[in-house]
Image (cartoon, rainbow, N blue to C red):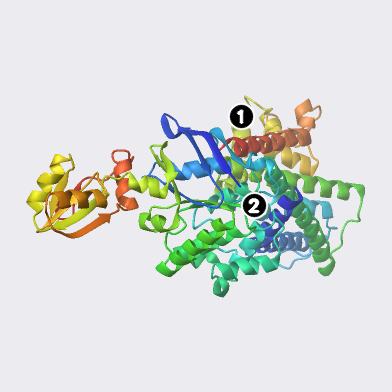
Amino acid sequence: MSAALVYEWRRITSIRATYVLAALFLLATAAVTFLIAQASAGVDFEGNAIEATAVPLGVVVVTGTNALSAIFLTTIAAQSFGHEYRYGLIRLTLSEFPRRWVIFTAKLAMVVAWIVALFVASVAVAVLVLAVSRTDTEPWSADVWNQIWRSGLFLVGYCAIAFALTLITRNLVLGVVIPLLMSAVVENLVVFGLAERAPWIADVLPFQAGNRFATGELGINMATGEAFTNPSFLASQPGLVYLVWVVVLVAASFVTLRSRDA
Amino acid sequence: MIVEAQGLRKTYGSVVAVNDLSFTVSPGHITGFLGPNGSGKSTTMRLMLGLDHGAGTTLFDGRTLAQHRPVSTVVGSHLDAKFFHPRRTARAHLRMMGSEAGISKARINEVISLVGLQAVADKRPGGFSLGMGQRLGLATALLASPRVLLLDEPANGLDPQSIQWLRDFLTHYAQQGNSVLVSSHLLSEMELMADHLIVIAQGRLIADESMQSFVSRSTKNDVLVRSSDPVALRQALARYSLAATPEGADGLAVTGAATDRIGDIAFEAGVAVRELVFRQASLEDAFLETTRGSADFATGNETPGGAA
């Protein structure tokens, strides 16, 4: 396993795209933080004075990681197998590591390690930007920590889904685009379209559940337009629903790797 | 290291690409792997490496590849000249591929020199020519000094000097007790390089024998005899049931007998012999004869000038 981890470390660190994507992610986080800081600074975009509010760091992190900036990290995750299939390297890789679970585990572990490291870096960037912009920030609290670790887990799951979909489709672009479209467009259309007939649908969709888990909010009942007062089991456990989706997709991708020809 | 492929079989739907293929690749030899286009050579190599799923097993000194550690010291493979990331430098590519066996930087430099890629080692291989890609692929295969080399068309795109280098290198590599299985459609090159042949067609084994034995079975092996009276000599040969075909003004191409026997017959017939020479068929002749009608993607018989 250690050899596979070394292989994977050398793979991910030897292409410039990894560093470019990481930098873009941190830059996007900085930009999101800066915009939120400006919006809370007591001056609107036309220079008129408005009531200043303290910037909630937890919201900054949730916004930074759930917004489009996450696509940079999902691309890093998708490249893990995406490049191997695109350039035929998979045959070299599997020749060296004939026990496929070894390289699968190493790649997944390396992706998770990079995502966690970059997420931690993005939190640091957010704190730094808020400090530099001299914006009043809400004090660190249990709620802030709660939102931060939830966002981190959401992001790891999101990237694991991209990793898995790339392996299943053997296509880097699909591995990035499918989760993006699902989370930003398709799921929302499904939820609104089935609000009357299947109001529970939002509880079982992966990114709806993932977003609820990340924000720590249960959302609203799409049928009534009101906040849940007595949610069902699935609606009250968005983290579990999200986790099941992630595990199922990752397991399916492993079965795919194991059973297909290289 | 002895490589034993046993009962390899691979199907794509109803198409049988490799059909119950068994053979052995012995150490100390370069084994040529021949077959018409689409005969299943590449699929066989992928099956041997465990890249494709199918029936049968391939044992390396009695064990499957997955049972060896590190794998890259057992077998080095080169299946395609373009198996690299176009923006990862050649050196970084080799460093990555050397991870499994813990290859040192010194060994990477050594292999880069060996294949002649020093000038471009730190360049991105996206712009490499086919020949340079082949060299990088060979470097990857050789990195961990494996005891078995599986090479699929390694001479494609190489210039004559590089082909000669490849031949000399593989000959030396095999002489050190390593096993080499190499496929190529450059039959003249294979004739110079390999000493054993495995020939397949439509996924089935056609021949598994030494180069000499394979070529000697060709009907193109004959004896050219030039004489003072070819008509009389032909009649004399016919009395011994030997077929002779006129060739040139005074020549006969005789099959089925060695030079000394033909000389004796000419002597008995009182015909003066001006030239008596054995002409050996080429590997190409023998290969085409053996695989005639077996090509999955055979061309027609028409020549550029019209029907042959």
State the mark number for residue B72. 2
> As shown in the figure, which amino acid type bears the numbered disc 1?
Leu
Residue at the spot x=29%, y=43% of the render? B289
Which chain letter matches label 2? Answer: B
The residue that disc 1 covers is A194
For marks 1 and 2, give the one nearer the viewer.
Answer: 2
The quadrant of the picture occupied by the C terminus of chain A is: top right
Q: Is residue A224 above or below residue A61?
A: above
Side (left or right) of B295 relative to A133: left
Q: Quadrant of residue B110?
A: bottom right
Side (left or right) of B202 relative to B229: right
Residue at the spot x=82%, y=51% of the render? A58
Q: Secondary structure at mark 2?
A: helix
Q: Is residue B225 above or below residue A231?
A: below
Q: Position of residue B40 (x, y in %)?
A: 43, 41
- The alpha-carbon separation of the residues under discs 1 and 2 comes to 55 Å
Q: Residues within 10 Å of mark 2 (few under 14, many from 20)?
A: many
Residue B111 in view: yes
From the viewer's side, name the closer residue of A135 and B57: B57
Residue at the spot x=65%, y=38% of the render? A254
Q: Secondary structure at mark 1?
A: loop
Side (left or right) of B61 relative to B128: right
Q: Is residue B135 above or below residue A109?
A: below
Q: Position of residue B50 (x, y in %)?
A: 58, 41
> As shown in the figure, which amino acid type bears the numbered disc 2?
Ser
Side (left or right) of A40 relative to A260: right
Which chain letter matches label 1? Answer: A
Q: Position of residue B294 (x, y in %)?
A: 32, 38
Residue B85 in view: no
Residue at the spot x=24%, y=48% of the render? B261
From the viewer's side, name the closer residue of A21 and B139: B139
Q: Position of residue A198 (x, y in %)?
A: 64, 25
